[in-house]
Amino acid sequence: MIAMKKVISVLTWVLILLFSCSLPAAASGLTITTSTSSSEITTGSSITLTVQVSNTGTTSQSGVTIEIDLSSANGGLSLNATTTDLQDQTESQTISAGNSVTKSWTIYGFSAGSYANQIQINVKQSGTDITGSPVYESVTVKDPARFTTPTITTTTAVDLGDTFTFNVTTQNSGDYAIQNAVASISASGFTVEDSSGTTSTSIAADAIFTPGWTLNATSSGTKTVTVTLSADNAASVTASETITVSGTSTPTPTPTPTPTPTSTQNQVVGGGGGGGSSTTTNVPIDIYGKVKSTTILRSDDGKASLTIEEGTVATSRSGSSVSYISMVEVSFEGAIIAYEFGPNGATFDPAIELEFRYDPADIPENADEEDLVIKVYENGSWNTLDTTIDTTAHTATTKVEHFTPFALMLPETSPAIPADYFTETNPEEETNVQEKSPTATTPAPAKTSRNGATLVGVILIVAIIAAGIGVYYYKKR
């Protein structure tokens, strides 16, 4: 009997030992840490969930998996931005003593709601939850600030000259206040005589926004009035209404504009084609002869522009301040763009910026756009200036210190210019490349003939002698 008790005792200890060995080694030493990037998101946006499992024990722990389960959120949360995806888990892995593993998931908010403890994280070892598992995280999903589709209240048929109201009603259907809301109206064929409630610094969740206008029908026909609602933190929405205006409109006479006098230029140099348009623009000059503010001048066709910095001293050939600048497009054979600026000979300190805007289609075939240069004609030849080419904006830029012809061309291009191309003009007047007028000539004074004067003297002497002879015979008789 005693022997039997000893056998039973030994078997009991053996079973206890075996059972102890079968327990997961992770029962002690594995810890779980979780965090989310935010506790609140808007519908359609996401948070990042991070799970870290650390082995604080002295031996490696194997067969560790991390699982995430969003089933409790009933479809309000998902692991996929476009479809419902509620569960995921890592592969089985081993965590050595003193180390940890980290896993992150992106969780999307599908519908507004408070999802307290509905993000479930399970950490298992060999299929069994470790101590402290599962762990729960929470997130709140809110609808962003947004306008509901506007409702328009107005009449849809009026007579010409009628005054009527045009009102709009919308609501903030989001969970956040709409910030700095503005209502604007586009009403061709109507004049806006009054408006009310068209702005709001804040529209609380579920609050109403009711802008309105008073319109007067100024032309007949079928008209469309459109209202646009916009804000700092809400998507813009529009609403339109068609209004029929009855009656006959009396057309308003269009006044004939008074043409602005400009210098024109049609000169062709070297067979390159006709001239172009011109523009004259005033330059703000202070009492000291300096440009009062940075000024950008552009030609009517947009091909040429000048940038004159504040403080620049602009001086004409006569030494007076330049209060205007003219731009005249000219043509030189082989040049892509060419301009003459006036007053001719004006100087600038510091140098001003010249920009040509070109059409890539005008560049000769097989030529490289980056090779284009701006050249200046001076001292009887074309000289290349330091040029910056922007192949995206198709512009060429350089600095110029005085006015003379400038042209955009290829480096090897050097158009010929006739010797009489330039015309001397009053430097105080607008000076551009102009067609030369025939030079007026003053008739030379008639020369007095010396032989003619001698003949007159002889005749006078003969007449005197004849008179003396006549007197002599008269007395003798």
Image: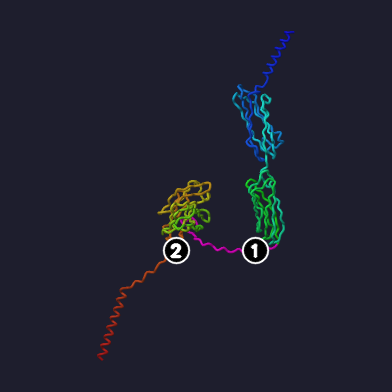
Image quadrant for the C terminus? bottom left
Relative height, residue 59 to residue 246 (above, below): above
Name the element at disc 1: loop
Residue 174's image quarter? top right
Q: Start and end of the magenta stretch?
A: 247-274
Residue farthest along the bottom direction in this orientation: 477
Q: Quadrant of residue 454?
A: bottom left
CA gap, disc 2 to disc 1?
Answer: 47 Å
Q: Is residue 326 magenta?
A: no
Q: Amino acid at mark 1?
A: Pro
Decide: is 436 above or below 451: above
Say which mark, if any, is on residue 383: none
Q: Is residue 145 left or right of residue 401?
A: right
Residue corresponding to mark 2:
437
Q: Which residue is mark 1?
A: 251
Give the dominant element type of the magenta stretch: helix, strand or loop: loop
Q: Quadrant of the N terminus?
A: top right
| Residue 294, position as x, y percentages in the image | 49, 53
Whole-percent x, y for residue 100 in the image: 60, 27
